[in-house]
Amino acid sequence: MTESAKRHRSERAFSVADITATQIEEFYCDYFLPLVRHAVRRHGLTMEDAGDVVQDAFLLALGKLDPAGNPKAWLYQVVDHLSANWRRKITRRAQLLARWEGQAKSGPEAADADESTK
Amino acid sequence: MIGNGRLLELLPRWVAATRGVEVGFRLSSEEQNAQTRRLRHHLQDSARTKSVDTGDFINLDAVSAVCGILQSVNVPSKATLLEAECAFDTVSAARWPSGEFGEIPEVLCQIAFVAWRNSRALGLPERAYRWRRAFENSLRQPSTMRDCVHQFLTTLSKDQSTVLNVNPFLGPLTAYALCALLADQRDVAPRYVARTGRRLHALVGELAGSECWSCERDYFRGQTALLIAATERQLGNRRDAISWLTAAENHFNRIPNPIDLLADAAYTRFAIAHENGAADFVLTGIPELIRLYGSFGAEHEIARCRLLEASMLKTAGKIDDAVRACEALFATENLANEYLSLGLAISAELRTIRGDYAGALQVLDRLRNLLSSFDLPSATAHLQACVGEVMRQTGRCGAAIQVFSEARDSFARLGMVGITARVRLVLGETLLSVGRLDDAECELSKAVSVFREQRMMPEIGPAMALLEECSRRRRNQER
């Protein structure tokens, strides 16, 4: 992306920070919700988790979105990547939790022994 | 519907306004879960009663949640298939506002994929075929999902190293959509399809095992290999076509319930045999293949077989039988434009052979009208070749040479070397008939080199005879 395009975008980002209620509603219905639903459908995320992922995608878009390309496709793919990472993180956390619970059930000695073998 | 400009304008404002704030939803998690459960019960009831009801509680949030649940089921089951079937009918029947991301076609693609996947795994070829077609039709609708798949293919065709970065993104649904979209472009850009298909074939071999059901990797590798085989045949590279076809059959033989896949492979084998002039093999096998396709309602494929049969009968000189095969083709309901156009081209050729030039021109006029509303470049090239043949038969050799040259260039632009060489052969013969020996020799030599390279035995004989005729006439002129 050219320097002038970057400058133009950052000017636009900081000069018009205010947004009307109608515009909020418009953006919410036309962009936020469809991307949330996409993450729910494609990656099985909950609406809340998907909402966080989409907000992260919007933040990334501020710095990286190329207005000359296909912004919707770009956002869609970023939501896919972030959702996949999110799901991986949740799976890893669940595995760790299951291991920890297993260790806790077999007693603190076993957990200590397990730690020392590591 | 608001455009990209509006997105770019509102995005920074939205981010600024929602920074540090949790964006909420109209319903709480419990309410959303209750709504999803209600929709699932409704779909399961509809599956039992075989009715479609688009109640007012059906909304995209609930549909999306159900979609996510259906896709996450990892074991094939009849219950999932029935629920997906009902979900598809319900979403299709409901009225939705058109959205920015083309969500409805995406939802339909995802549900059709679930239904296809389960029917395949359960050994239900008729339903698998129906859901494959439903998926392809939904994928043809504009949506951001389609744009992304298209973008993925473009990246794949240009630079394989870039694709490794998006590899984790590739799952069975994406792979299925990539295969379908690439197959759709075969007639428009065969060279691109052959090149990209090879890369896709390598890529689908790396699909994560955890995401694939048993043998799905073989399914995708087989499908891409078959697509490459069919495209190489279209391009005239017969040796490549045969080796890819064998690879596809090997993959398919490792899959349970491969009847529909082996039928597609058999069709490609017959199409290659058709080009080798093996009339007995093709004409004996095609009726059996039509019966097989009929057993799972593959109307589109039956039309394709009838077209091949008509063309083979024409090549074998069985003109009356070829006319009957064309009539059977035209009687097909909802005949796809690509088959209708090729059928019309064959019909025009048959009329030309019978000397019915006025009838041939009438058919060609119908074909020209059809092609003016659709982008079918290979059919357009066929039309040019047919028009050239009518001109030649009616003694208008100058015009025929002009039209044959256009057909040659059209086929060459599509990278279809085999058929380009055949047009060169006819063009060479026409040039020879008007005494343009240098031009004729040039066209025929180029044709012969392709025939030799591709081992197109039936064509080599006539081409060599015409080249000898050129030399004989040149010797006579020199005397």
Image (cartoon, grey):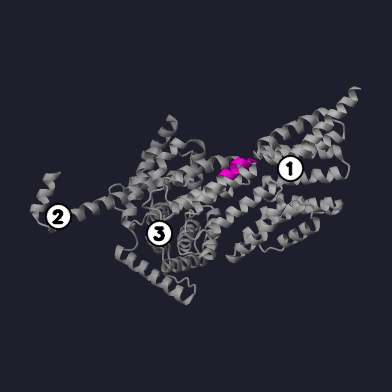
- Residue at 65% across / 48% down in the picture? B272
Disc 2 vs disc 3: which is toward the camera? Answer: 2
Q: Secondary structure at mark 3?
A: helix
| Disc 1 packing (10 Å; few <14; some 14–19; many ≥20) | few
Looking at the image, residue B164 lies above or below residue B96: above
Q: Which residue is mark 2?
A: A103
Q: Which residue is mark 1?
A: B458
Q: Which residue is mark 3?
A: B71
**Are dots 1 and 2 in contact, CB under 8 Å?**
no
- Using the numbered discs, state the Cα–Cα distance from disc 2 to disc 3 in whole angstroms: 33 Å
- Using the numbered discs, state the Cα–Cα distance from disc 1 to disc 2 in whole angstroms: 76 Å
Quadrant into which the C terminus of chain B falls: top right
The amino acid beneath tag 3 is Gln
To the question of a shared chain for discs 1 and 3, the answer is yes
Q: Earlier in the sequence, mark 1 or mark 3?
A: 3
To the question of a shared chain for discs 1 and 2, the answer is no
